[in-house]
Image (spheres, rainbow, N blue to C red):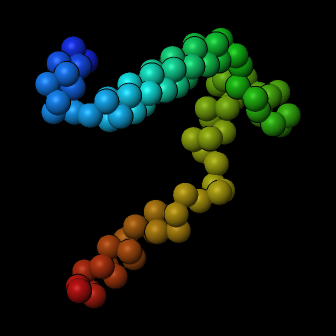
Amino acid sequence: MKIARKIHRAFRGDVGPKALALELLRRSRVSLTRNRERARLQSSENEAAHLLPLFARMSSKELLAHFRNREQPYFFPGFSDCDSVANAQTRNPE
C-alpha cells in the first residue's frame, strides 16, 4: 500500500497517529539498513577473498582442482555411500 494512502487513512481515523509514526520509523530504519547493506556489498565486490596461506599460494585452476578432487572433509556421511542409505530407507518405511 502506498504511503499516501496510509496517510489518507490516518487522517480519516482508520489508523491512529501512534501507529502511523511507528510505521514511518520502521520503514525508515529498514530503508537505512538496506542502503547500508548495499553499500557494504558494493565496496566488498572488488576485494580479494581472504584465504589460508596454503590456499593463497594456489592459482585459481589449482584451487578448483583441489576442491573438486579432495577426499576430506566429507559433506555428510550419507553422501559417500548412497546405495546403503537408499537400501536402508526402502527396508524401514515409517
- The residue sitting at 66% across, 39% down in the picture is 66
- The residue sitting at 52% across, 63% down in the picture is 76
**Res. 93 visible in picture:** yes
Q: In this view, does 76 lie to the left or right of 61?
A: left
Viewer-nearest residue: 60 or 39: 39
User: Which quadrant of the rendered structure holds the C terminus?
Assistant: bottom left
Residue 2 vertical placement versus 29 (above, below): above
Q: Position of residue 53 (x, y in %)?
A: 85, 34
Viewer-nearest residue: 88 or 32: 32
Q: Where is residue 60 in the image (x, y as percent from the top left)?
A: 66, 23
- The residue sitting at 45% across, 22% down in the picture is 28
Q: Position of residue 89 (x, y in %)?
A: 30, 79
**Res. 2 visible in picture:** no
Q: Where is residue 72 in the image (x, y as percent from the top left)?
A: 66, 56
Viewer-nearest residue: 17 or 24: 17
Among the 4 quarters of the image, the one containing residue 51 = top right
Q: Is residue 42 left or right of residue 12?
A: right
- The residue sitting at 62% across, 41% down in the picture is 67
Among the 4 quarters of the image, the one containing residue 50 = top right
Viewer-nearest residue: 26 or 14: 14
Q: In this view, does 58 lie to the left or right of 85?
A: right
User: Which quadrant of the rendered structure holds the N terminus?
Assistant: top left
Residue 5 vertical placement versus 57 (above, below): above
Among the 4 quarters of the image, the one containing residue 63 = top right
